[in-house]
Amino acid sequence: MTVTSRFARPATSVWPVTEPSGEVSRGNTGQPLDVTIVLPCYNEQDHVLREIERITEAMDNSGYDYELLAIDDASTDQTLQVLQEAQARFPRLRLMPFHRNGGSGTARRIGSQQARGEIVVWTDADMTYPNERIPELVQMLEKEPAIDQVVGARTSEQGTHKVLRVPAKWLIRKVAEGLTGTTIPDLNSGLRAFRRQVSLPYLRLLPPGFSCVTTITMAFLHNQHEVRYLPIDYAKRSGSSKFHFVKDAYRYILQVLRMVMYFNPLKVLMPPALWLLALGVGKVIYDVVANPVRIATNTIMIVMTALIIGAVALLADLIVRSRSDG
């Protein structure tokens, strides 16, 4: 069972990867595969082996030709040693160790760039996502060529700071839906599958942290790629959470706005410009009626601010369009 690629494979890069045989290869030099599962690992020594067992069992039974690319993000525990020992048991396991901690976004970006599979799967190694369902995501892409990404949409929230996370994620998701004009059941799910060739132009946009999953969703939606959602269960994570509520929530919001600015700046800048302009025009009319010989200073400031924001919006849109045409 082979997933048909619509694009040619990219040029070989030089990132060192440890093969199951123990030899070091230099990047994407192997034969094309159906699927690459990118598994970022940071201090997951207690459960990464169980996760590998669960993933490989599901993929072995699926009939897909695959590789499991485990990326050790400079763990400070024994995660790397566990992964090295696991290579003898799992011939489909490829290991990529980082010398410095780069964050989950960096791991996913480099893993996707080095993937041999036509389909790339992102997931976590903390036992939260139902990785036994990975073949279902891949199968949706295989059966429907029009779909470019399938996201595992979580039906429950099991993370820390639940009282704060649920409303915060809802608000961020609603902002993203308003800016993209689409319904997004789960904006930042860590379990997803997508066509590698389609993702290549957007991988450079990925930030180093958790908001990389938000970025890849927004990038696909803004560029008219079909994204589907598969409802999944979400379990309580094994080990301690690496999510920091205030810092990561701020990054999520900033990344949503950044992505919309990158692809459609008018959607962010033009509404406040028009709102301020309407307010300014109304204030001008009021000032003229109240005092025909004098327009208030704050009225002039409101109108000028609206015109400046509108000009910036048009200039940003021109830059986006010229970049796309080039």
Image (spheres, helix red, strand yellow):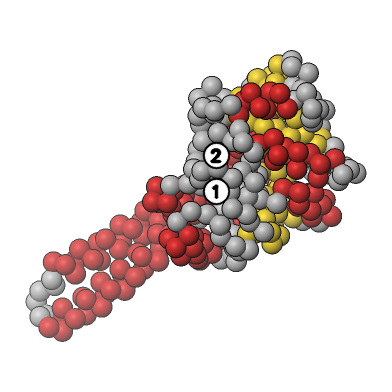
Marks counted in the figure total: 2
Name the residue located 51 percent from the left edge and 31 percent from the top edge.
102
Which amino acid, by three-letter code, is at mark 1?
Thr
Residue 82's image quarter?
A: top right
* Left or right of 300 in this view: 203: right
Residue 142 x, y percent position in the rendering: 82, 50
Q: Is residue 303 above or below residue 107?
A: below
Observer-nearest residue: 52 or 225?
Answer: 52
Rate crowding at label 2 as few (under 14), some (14 to 19) or many (20 or more) other CA atoms within 10 Å.
many
Name the residue located 81 percent from the left edge and 41 percent from the top edge.
57
Residue 299 x, y percent position in the rendering: 19, 69
Name the residue located 76 percent from the left edge and 38 percent from the top edge.
53
Mark 2: which secondary structure? helix
Which amino acid, by three-letter code, is at mark 2?
Gly
Q: In the picture, which quadrant includes the N terminus? A: top right
Q: Is residue 147 above or below residue 208?
A: below
- Asked if residue 224 shows in the view, the reply is no
Q: In the picture, which quadrant includes the C terminus? A: top right
Q: Is residue 252 above or below residue 299?
A: above
Residue picked out by circle 2: 105
Observer-nearest residue: 203 or 237?
Answer: 237
Residue picked out by circle 1: 215
Residue 286's image quarter?
A: bottom left
Q: Is residue 268 above or below residue 138?
A: below
